[in-house]
Image (cartoon, coloured by chain):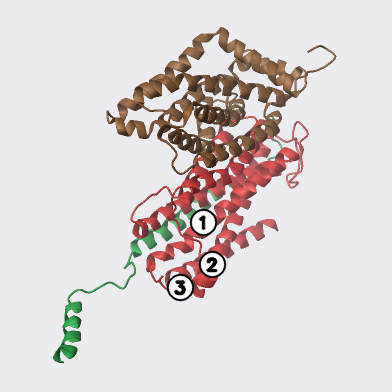
Amino acid sequence: MAQRTRQGLFALAVAMLAIGAWLGLSWAPPDREMGDVQRIMYVHVPSMWMALLAMTLNFACSIGYLLKKSWAFDSLAEASAEVGMLFGAVGLALGSIWARPTWGVWWTWDPRLTTAAILLVAYAGYLALRRFVEDPERRAVWAAVTGIVAFVDVPLIWYSVQWWRSIHQIQSSPKTVDPQMVLTLRWNTFAFLALGIFFIWSRYRVAQSERRHELAAPPTLPSAPQGLTASGVRL
Amino acid sequence: MMLDRVLPLLIEQLAAQYPVGAGRIQGGWGYVWASYGITWGAFAVYSLSLWLRRAHPPMPEEHQ
Amino acid sequence: MNARHPPGLLEGAFLILRKDLLIEWHTRARLNALLFFALATLLIFSFALGPDTKLLEQNAGGYLWLAILFASLMALGESFRVERENASLDGLRLLPVNPRAVFLGKALGNAAILFGLSLVLIPVMVGLFGVSLALGLGSLGLILVLGCLAISAPGTLYSAIASNGQARDVLLPLLLFPLIIPALLAAVKATSLVFQGDPMSQLNSWLLLLGGFNLTYWGLGVALFPQVIEE
């Protein structure tokens, strides 16, 4: 049942992305100043939003794990960090590509780009930590601590870098932007959200499976998703 | 005066020799296609990696 | 401390601090190595960036804090080495010492070592980079204290995590560096203002940022450290 839902979600996401691409590449009008290059916004912005959403989920799960030692929290934290990295890296690359024709440079130390880059390195560290610790319970605790610390740092990084000159776009409110652009952006945002949920859900299942193999749960019925680990922690 | 009628014509002719752009970035479709291509490519590769790592049902005889 | 009264938080922290600093002092070779490493780093910066004294002077704040940061990796990596080699972390866990006290003691110890190091580096900066203390030693001292505390809190937390793993040399900088960028930024900016003067009174803003950063990270460290060393 859950398998069908997941597959349906994937199909939905792909369909929405396809429509979103048509909206972004053809239906939406070119920007008054940036011309057609502005169409990159429809993939760049949803990507970054998904990355932030995933990192927030990681933060919540990290806290959740420290409060209640459930493997579900740990697996979900792992999944959301990895998917967040994916969207973040894509978003950063797209931002750089967009910057080239509009600002004339591939990179600039503006607050958003800088913060995004720092965040990516921080979560790469998180994923590296997960890879280097073998004991599952230790790994879960330390990863949770690292995830919490990294997330709390985000506003600090943001404000410190903010005090340098920023040439990033001032966020335009929908009222001042062409309604076709607003619709295109909204549609693509939901498309990316659907895909992101699918990715996190699937990656969560992979993580849970790995956990089961690692912890060598005592023989249970193959169909039962739950078991007890050697130390009595519920899967 | 003659100048009233000649001057605008002169200016118009002068301006036609120095065309100004529409005030927007022209073209740039290469960047757009690169962006969308990277996005789809990354998603496709990640989807594949998820499928390759897909969860296998636990074996009943597995033990330490 | 006696058998009937386990040490309180601050007393426990002080005991750990004293123990660590005494160990470091008795084996001064390591402290010396730390100092020479920082000096060598400063020297290399001045060579790598060429003889343009104007440039060196302008960026001196950055070089100072980079040298302190690199040295901190050595100092922090050491932080749990004694415990790891002698398996005495178990001993610490068994003793009725609050793990938060362990964190406070160790982090303060690391901060003290870094601060001492930075004090020694200041005259070197004046000599090598030709900087002058436009805003005075007091302001500089405050920035050094806040900066060293800011590196030490997350550094000690991550040192406990990294020191137990396989790739501890790689993991500590990878985890620590992104996180302390705000503190580093603030410290460098503030130091540059001290060296070059502060016509627009920006120093307080940077000090506030450093202060806020410290509050956040010491708070997080005290809150999360017990989970990190728990068996």
Residue located at (47% from left, 58% from top):
A44
Residue C32 visible to the viewer: yes
Instruction: Write down the residue under mark 3.
Output: A28
**Would you call the spot at circle 3 few (<14 residues within 10 Å), some (14-19), or many (20 or more)?**
many
How crowded pointer 1 is (Cα within 10 Å; few <14, some 14-19, many 20+) is rated as many
Q: Residue furthest bottom?
A: B1
Instruction: Give the residue number, with chain letter if any, for mark 1.
Output: A47
Q: Label 3 is placed on what type of residue?
A: Ala
Question: The residue under label 1 is which amino acid type?
Answer: Ser
Determine whether label 3 and label 2 are within 8 Å by CB.
no
Quadrant of the frame with the N terminus of chain C: top right
Q: Position of residue A99 (x, y in %)?
A: 39, 56
> Camera-side residue: A55 or A232?
A55
Q: Element type at marker 1?
A: helix
- Amino acid bearing label 2: Ser
Q: Position of residue A187 (x, y in %)?
A: 55, 68
Let me know if marks 3 and 2 both belong to one chain: yes
Q: Position of residue C136 (x, y in %)?
A: 47, 28
Q: Are marks 1 and 2 on the same chain?
A: yes
The chain that appears red in the image is A
Chain coloured green: B
Residue C214 drawn at (x, y percent): 60, 34
Distance from Cα at disc 3 to Cα at disc 1 = 19 Å
